[in-house]
Image: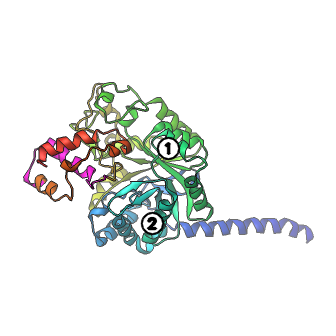
Amino acid sequence: MKKIHTILLPCLAIVCAVLLLTACNSKSNTFKENPDMEYRTLGSTGLRVGVIGLGCGGFDEIDSATSRELVTAALDRGMNCMDLYDANPKVRSNIGYGLGDRRKEMIIQGHIGCWWNGDSYERTRDVDKCKKGFEDLLTRLNTDYIDIGMMHIFDKMEDWKAVQGSDYLQYVKDLKAQGKIKHIGVSSHNAEVALAIAKSGLVEVIMFSLNPAFDRVLSGKSPWDPETFNNMLPGIDPVRVELYDYCAQHNIAITVMKAYGGGDRLLDAEKSPLKVALTRDQCVAYALAKPCVAVSFCSADNANKLDEYLHYLKATEEEKDYNAVLNRQTAQAEAGTGGCTYCKHCAPCPVGIDIAKVNELYDEAQKDGLSAQLAAEYKQLAHHAGECVECGACEERCPFSVPVRERMKQAEALFGY
């Protein structure tokens, strides 16, 4: 009998430990996989995510009721992963209301280093602002934890070096130790920087801008500079290849932003730097072909829009095939309409110009002509291109080296003020 106890007691201890771990994990995520969705494991986090995720773009232009419909539809369709970088209180509150009592069904990437200054979003490493911004995120989402705490936008190597041993990095680590974030991640548009952070061993998830146009840009070059695309690489940039391989080998998940090139640019042959049009299905298939990629994010402002993105799940192999389209792309493609992807990382403007919106309206007018509707929409903006003081701060923050000051002059000339 003594021998039996000697054998059984350790076994019971192991069983109890497993049950306890399972119970703890169930508190963090209670989502049940939808048979209509494809799922992948989010790197070493062990979390299971649908391959099509929900971005936060669009929530600033809808009300709370529509937000609830959108989030509910996403969850019901199996979209259980969401990125939330925007510090806009309206966006956060809309998403919090949209989640309602289903918070534990959604795996959330919440960014650390986003600050709302009262007028616009800004990127910051100031710990006091980061703390206030993160606590605001928890409050507005009505939650006490974020699944993936994303260090927000590291696009320059000097930015990464600057936080080594800093209060900012310690704050991120403290959040994990306290259980306020379950895992640490980072967002970046720069392969060299993302690779360096991956090799640091700190992160389990990297949010990265990945699509067939950006992949063909030599590291360190702007993917929206016309000259860049006059010298487009015949294949994927070697640094990006190393990043994808390293992440796959070390079980670091990549979550994809700008799969469609930013502003759906790759879906339009006239706008695309590739000078050929891809479909949504082809863009998603391209991203998910990388073994390290777990989820590709999309943004929508209504539930019906989700079906356009989710068509990938029932698309044929022929519909997903991007190779035939990319083979028609020429190495001398130009960058198209001027480069802005409307991501808003240029903010804040010191005089309050919504640079992304001005650029979007300008691009639409360049493509389709200046209509009365576009002119009216431009007029309703609180601040206009002609107010630009040419400080250049926006260009310093732009991940794609868009010549914002010149673009503001062009918009002013077009719209008249």
Q: Where is residue 416 in the image (x, y as percent from the top left)?
A: 11, 47
Q: Which residue is drawn at 41% across and 57% down?
A: 85
Q: Does the magenta stretch include residue 348?
A: no
What range is drawn magenta here?
349-373
The answer to whether residue 218 is left or right of residue 166 is left
Q: Who is closer to the viewer here, 107 or 174?
A: 174
Q: What residue type is labelled 1?
A: Asp
Q: Is residue 321 left or right of residue 200?
A: left
How many residues crowd around disc 1 within 10 Å: few (fewer than 14), some, or many (20 or more)? Answer: few
**What predominant SS class does the magenta segment belong to?**
helix
Image quarter hosting the N terminus: bottom right
User: Closest to the observer: 125 or 38?
Assistant: 125
- The CA distance from mark 2 to mark 1 is 24 Å
Where does label 1 land, which residue?
159
Residue beneath disc 2: 137
Q: Is residue 360 magenta?
A: yes
Disc 2: CA contacts within 10 A as few (<14), some (14-19) or many (>=20): many
Q: Mark yes or no: residue 202 visible.
A: yes
Q: Where is residue 271 in the image (x, y as percent from the top left)?
A: 23, 39
Q: Name which residue lies at 38% across and 66% down.
A: 92
